[in-house]
Amino acid sequence: MTNRDELLRKLTALDFYLIDLQLYLNTHPRDAEALNIYNSVVKEAKALREEYERMFGMLTANNPSKLPWQWIDEPWPWQYSFNFDLAGENG
Amino acid sequence: MWIYDKKLEFPVKIRKPDPRMAKVIITQYGGPDGELAASLRYLSQRFSMITPEAKATLNDIGTSVPKLRTFSRLYKTAGRFAPERRA
């Protein structure tokens, strides 16, 4: 696993966690424990995202770019080389 | 309304193309009871919700485009199309 794969794996996991927490909090808005977790994961994911973007280019288009415009850089998520392999972890 | 995040909600790395599996996936994606139709239903239903909980939930599951993108990515490589050359 390359450094990029590893960073992307961590960020994907955190973002997935956030989606789940967000949906849970929608129906449990007074759960202090879940809210604490959410708030700390948001910070963690934000830092990781910034690190990823610094090293491997922007993930969303509302970001500053170097010249030339980086948004069109490959690979896109539907291309084989973009994604990392989870199978390696489970054998 | 949406901001494209240049990554998937869940990683997809398919080792062996499987056209039969792809057929199932495309049905779940765009079929009559597929995710695409469900998303749009949630987005319409949210307008008639009363509680803040229900409004937010329908809004958020209706906008779960990441799920759709993961599906389309799955279809692309599982499908009859040859996966792109591995660089």
Image (cartoon, coloured by chain):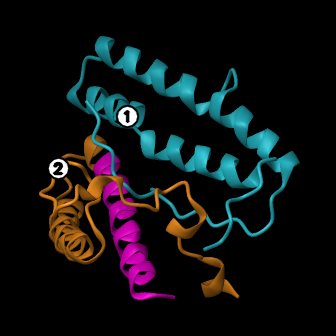
Quadrant in the picture for the C terminus of chain B? bottom right
* Chain letter, disc 1 residue: B
Residue shown at the point (34%, 71%) measured from the top left: A11
Tint applied to chain A in the drawing: orange
Identify residue for label 2: A30
- Chain under disc 2: A
| Residue furthest left as drawn | A64
Q: Quick check: A81 above or below B84?
A: below
Q: Quick check: A18 left or right of A31? A: right
Q: Categorize mark 1 by other alpha carbons within 10 Å: few (<14), some (14-19), many (20+).
A: some
Q: Is residue B52 above or below residue B65?
A: above
Q: Colour of chain B?
A: cyan
Which element is circle 2 on?
A: loop
- Is A14 part of what is drawn in magenta? yes
Q: Position of residue A20 (x, y in %)?
A: 38, 55
State the image coordinates of residue A46 (x, y, percent, origin top left).
18, 67
Quadrant the N terminus of chain B occupies? top left
Left or right: B3, with A43 as reference point? right
- Label 2 to label 1: alpha-carbon separation: 23 Å
> Which residue in the structure is indicated by mark 1?
B63
Magenta range: A1-24
Residue at left offset 27%, top offset 67%? A57
In this view, the mark in front (2 or 1)? 1
Q: Position of residue A87 (x, y in %)?
A: 66, 79
